[in-house]
Image (spheres, helix red, strand yellow):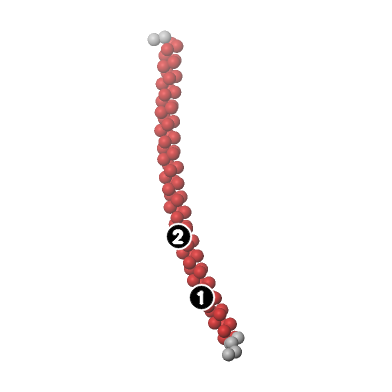
Amino acid sequence: MSTASKVVLTVSLVLTLSTVAGVHLKQAWDRERLHEGVVRDLERLQRKKENLRLLEEQKVLTRQLEEERQRREAKLHPQDT
């Protein structure tokens, strides 16, 4: 084998191995990013559930406060009938 052919063979092997390794690394990176997306979605759904629970709790408290305020106003200003 001539020196030129050895150099060409070596360069082609290095490029081929680099390409294969690069593709595998990119696939692993993509797979990890997909997994992180699922985890973020689950966390987001959990936060949404918690926010909805807090909203319902606030609605109940607001309703109770309004009822209490109406009772106080009724005691302070009884209607003349």
**x and y, in percent, of residue 17 in the image:** 41, 25
Element at label 1: helix
Q: In terms of image quadrants, where is residue 76?
A: bottom right
Q: Residue at x 43, y 49 (%)?
A: 39
Element at label 2: helix
28 vs 76: above or below:
above
On the image, numbered disc 2 is attached to which residue?
A: 49
**x and y, in percent, of residue 7 in the image:** 44, 15
**Count of numbered circles on the image:** 2
Q: Residue 36 or 11: which is nearer the viewer? A: 36
Point out the image quarter for the C terminus.
Answer: bottom right
Point out the image quarter for the N terminus.
Answer: top left
User: What's under tag 1, amino acid-wise?
Assistant: Gln
Q: Residue at x 57, y 86 (%)?
A: 75
Q: Going by the image, does 66 lie left or right of 1?
A: right
* Alpha carbon distance from label 2 to label 1: 23 Å
41 vs 55: above or below:
above
Q: Going by the image, does 40 lie left or right of 75?
A: left
65 vs 35: above or below:
below
On the image, numbered disc 1 is attached to which residue?
A: 64
Q: Residue 46 or 52: which is nearer the viewer? A: 52
Q: Residue furthest bottom?
A: 81
